[in-house]
Image (cartoon, rainbow, N blue to C red):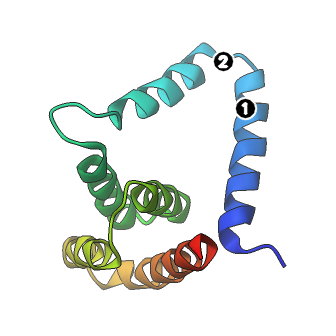
Amino acid sequence: MPNQVEEFNEYRLKMNDKILANDNKVIKRIFNLDTNAYKKGHLDVKTKELLGLVASAVLRCDDCIKYHLETAFKEGVTKEEVMETLSIATLVGGTIVVPHLRRAYEFWEELEIAKK
């Protein structure tokens, strides 16, 4: 049975390929801007991913939350760091963020299981 990490990545890759194949200059530039914004600069990648996680949770974008969780996981972020980050997001976003907090926690657990 595929887990939600695999399903998310397969769907994201498939749809990004289809979207980018249409060769829309604006969409390609937005994708490129996003890629470059999260590269190491004055802030390290880990910090940028945690910032992206807060913004994504506050904006209630589950796909974005999953993306930033997985990238943060690959950058060596700990569960404790994720929970502290999500606590800030929940504080800022309010109780409407709680369902996204639940799904984020579940996704993080699947990342940990996949690593084993």
Residue type at mark 1 is: Ile
Toward the right, the furthest residue is 1
Packing grade of label 2 (10 A; few <14, some 14-19, many >=20) is: few
Q: Residue at x 37, y 66 (%)?
A: 57
> Is 18 placed left or right of 85 in the picture?
right
At which x and y percent is residue 51? 26, 54
Packing grade of label 1 (10 A; few <14, some 14-19, many >=20) is: few
At which x and y percent is residue 106? 53, 83
Q: Residue at x 56, y 59 (%)?
A: 63
Mark closer to the chain start, 1 or 2: 1
Q: Residue at x 38, y 61 (%)?
A: 59
Residue type at mark 2 is: Asn
The residue to which callout 2 is attached is 24
> Is 16 placed left or right of 85 in the picture?
right
Q: How far is mark 1 from mark 2, CA to CA?
A: 8 Å
Q: Which mark is residue 19?
A: 1
* Disc 2 secondary structure class: loop
Q: Quadrant of the N terminus?
A: bottom right
**Quadrant of the rendered structure where residue 22 is?**
top right
* Callouts 1 and 2 close, C-beta under 8 Å: yes
